[in-house]
Structures are given as C-alpha cells and as structure tokens.
Image (cartoon, rainbow, N blue to C red):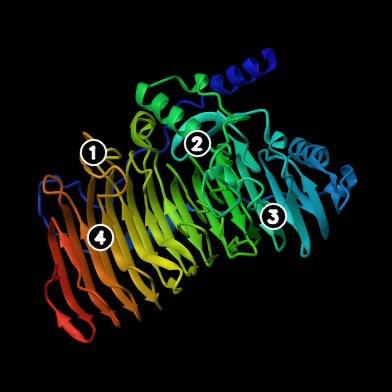
Amino acid sequence: MTNRRDFIQSIMAGGAGIALSSLSSNAIVRAIDPASSALIPDDDPWSQASQILARIKAPIFPARDFPITKFGAVGNGKADCTAAFAKAIDACNKAGGGRVVIPAGEFLTGAIHLKSNVNLHLAKNATTKFSQDPKKYLPVVFTRWEGMELMSYSAFIYAFEQRNIAITGEGIIDGQADCEHWWPWSGRTGCGWKQGDPSARKARTLLQEMVAKGTPVSERVFGEGSYLRPNLLQPYRCQNVLIEGVTLKDSPMWQIHPVLCTNVTVRDMNIEREANASNQTGPNTDGCDPESCRDVLIENCVFATGDDCIAIKAGRNNDGRRVAVPSENFIIRGCQMKDGHGGITIGSEISAGVRNVFAEKCHMDSPNLNIALRFKNNALRGGRLENFYFRNIEVGQVRDAVLTVDFNYEEGERGPFTPVVRNVVVNNLRSGKSARALDLQGFKNAPIYNVRLENCTFDNVAKENVVKNVQGLELKNVRINGKVVSEAAG
C-alpha cells in the first residue's frame, strides 16, 4: 500500500493535475456571441490550415537501433517480453534516443511505457501481442477514462510527460481483446457478458460522482476490480508525437488516445475492425480520439471500428471545465472511414471546447457507418464547438444522416450549461445514399449557429431533413435527390 501511495504522490507532484500552459487559445474566427446570428466570415479560412500545418513537425530520431531481442525478448508469442521492452526503451532513452526495434515474430508483453526520444519501431511481419491478464497493466497510472481524470490501468502503450516519441513501422499491435477478455467489462450483452457478471457500471457511476463533487484526482484510485477498460495507445501530456504506419487490432477500448499533447501526427495507420466469430465488434473501440490536444494532423488512415472512427474530445463535464484545455487546430485529410458510428465526430466529451478543425479529401462508405460528420453536445457537457471546415468529402453510403448536430445526446437538456455549435462549413460534399442529408437539432434557448453548405449533392436520400432550432443555415447549390434546395425542410 505504501508503494502505491508513493507512486500516486510522485505522479501528482509531476504536475499531472495542471493543464499545459502552452495550450492557449488561438481562435481563427473572431468570437461570436452565442445569441448572435452573424454569418461566417467570407474570407478563406483554409489559409489558416497552412499555418497550422507549418507548426506540425514529426520528431526526428538519432540513427541508433536497440533490438528488443538483444535485451532478452523472444518472438514465439508465448514468452513474456515485458522486461525486455522496458530495458530496451531505457537503454535507448539513456543513449540519447533512437529506435527500439521489434523484429519479425510475435512478442507477448504487458504495458509498455515510452520515454523521450524513443521511436518504438515494428518491423515488417512483427506483431506485438498484449497480455490478456489485467494485472500486467498495473500499477495504476494517471489517465483519462471517458474524459474524466483518475488513477487506473495503464494504456497498453503509455507515455507520460515525454518529448519526441513515436510508434512506427509496418507491423501489428494486437490488443487481444475479445468476448472473453476486456470487452465483457462494458456490460454489453452479446459479447460474453450476462446478467450478474462484473462490469464497469458501478465504477463508472462512482467516477462520475467524484468528478461532480470535485474529488481530488489523487483520491480517484481505480484499477483492479473496477473493470474500467484501458486504451490501446495513450501519450499523456507529451510533446512531438508521431504514430505512423502500423496496424491496430482488437483494442480493449479507444485505440489512439493522445491527451493534453501538442504537435501530434497520426499517419498511414490501419485501424482494423474488431469482431468475433459472430461478427460482434468491440464496444467503444474508437479509432483515434485526440483529447485536449493542439496542432494535430491525422492523414491517410483507414478506419473500421466498433465506434467513432475519429472523435475529437476535450474532457467530460466538470473535469473538462476544471482542466479547461480545448482541442484546437486540427487537420484531417486523405482518410478512409468504413465501419463505425461516426466518420469524423466532435464529442461527446467536449466540455473544454473544440475549435479550428479542417477536414478534406476523406472517403466514408459503409452500410455499417452510421453518420459521416457528427457533433455531440448537451446541457451537461456545455462545450463551445466552433470553426469547422469540411471540403471535398466523398460519402458512398451511411445508415443515418450525412451531417448531424445533436444537442439531445445522452443527458440532452438535463443540465445547467449552454451547449454551443457554430461556424460549420461544408463545401463540395457528395453522398450516394443515406437516410437523411441533415439532422440538426439545437435547443430553443441554445440554437445551432451558422451552418453553411455549398456545392453539395445528396442522392438516394430516404427521409426529409430534420432542422430544429438553427440560426444562420445557408444552402448554396445544394441538391437532394436531384432537386436544388434553398432551405432545409424539416
């Protein structure tokens, strides 16, 4: 018990409860009063995207390799290589940086903790398989779970307050989650869980109560017995992060989850759809969920997930407001979204706000993809979401609406805060099949402001638009089922 207490105190002393001061506001569009119906400025906001890209630079590493096999790792898929990974990473860090190389083979391990100036590199035909034993992800670390801070299981690959880190290569990172390990903790029937089995529900409720009461994070100690699933990859309060090239599969929960990071590049990733023999996908296995991050590039990735493909987040409820670090300055381009709940999603954990998101040249297409562009907010989150620009988006088919802004998500109006979504511009989007083109639902006391669609085509739309409590909706050269529409019916 003393060791765990000392560990927690050392983490908290490292400033884990303090927001990065470098993540200051830098809004692109001048702030607009939520009650205002002012139009989006006519000048080209995409000129700002180039300025964001100029700041995002992938880290560079010394030309030194540290193969894990030289530190005792055996690639037979059975030997525990946890200690070998730790030794190789420590040696690379102490030498001033380089690559920790995972060669061809299957390497079984518990939690991997990256250090500064280390590139964890998976060679072709290399697979890192993570243990299905939850004890391998203890002791607890400082983390976020569904946007709430706590001490809990380590992410499978975790880094805390490090600089210049990377996960690269052509190999596979296999979380080995399935309907017997990790996924049943969600309490979802149909994937190994049945009434009376343990689940995360009790711990989730307790954590939400702690957040509401303002319980110090050092006292929110979960871990063993809580059944709160860890994420697959989580750099936390890190600077200069690169995640490139590898394939991810069978994650316990969210897959790529940078938190409070600056200068992040996620590139050429393949996020595979997790499914058992009965085609049951992993619950809440979002593809890439940057949270309270600044200057982020996500490009040329393929997503097929058990939840949102990309979901930009910024803390949940009181924790998001307490830490008060928004997500801002994002570039998303050249990505392919297959199965999932939302292609590009903002929310729902967005209480600190999200702003300045640019997405282009993405392709979204699957009968198992619910929504292409999705915003989730409510009166308990109360986040301010502003300045979103989408262009050259191809949608083959989605199950529900192409563009959704939903203030009725989960708690809906049951909260004291004002949700804000404003300045959403969609240009040159083509959709081949959907239930609806638009589903925009604000509140009477908190409308959605300034949504502009231009040069957009929606074919094979089954139902009318839903438009409730929207001010400043502009449709220019928009066709639904071949008919030019100047205003959205609903």
Q: Which mark is residue 424?
A: 4
Q: Which mark is residue 174?
A: 3
Does the residue at mark 1 contact the one at mark 4 (Cβ under 8 Å)?
Answer: no
Quarter residue 221 falls in: top right
User: Which marked residue is nearer to the observer: mark 1 or mark 2?
Assistant: 1
Q: Residue furthest top?
A: 2
Q: Residue at x 61, y 52 (%)?
A: 251
**Amino acid at the residue labelled 4:** Val
Residue carrying label 1: 414
Q: Secondary structure at mark 2?
A: strand
Quarter residue 207 falls in: top left
Residue carrying label 2: 144
Quadrant where the C terminus is found in the figure: bottom left
Quadrant where the N terminus is found in the figure: top right
User: Which marked residue is nearer to the observer: mark 1 or mark 4?
Assistant: 1
Q: Residue at x 36, y 74 (%)?
A: 392
Instruction: Tell me which numbered mark, 4 or 3, is placed earlier along the sequence.
Output: 3
Does the residue at mark 1 contact the one at mark 3 (Cβ under 8 Å)?
Answer: no
Q: How far separated are the C-alphas under marks 2 and 4?
A: 28 Å
**Amino acid at the residue labelled 3:** Asp
Residue 42, can we see it? Answer: no
Instruction: Tell me which numbered mark, 3 or 2, is placed earlier along the sequence.
Output: 2
161 relative to 461, above or below: above
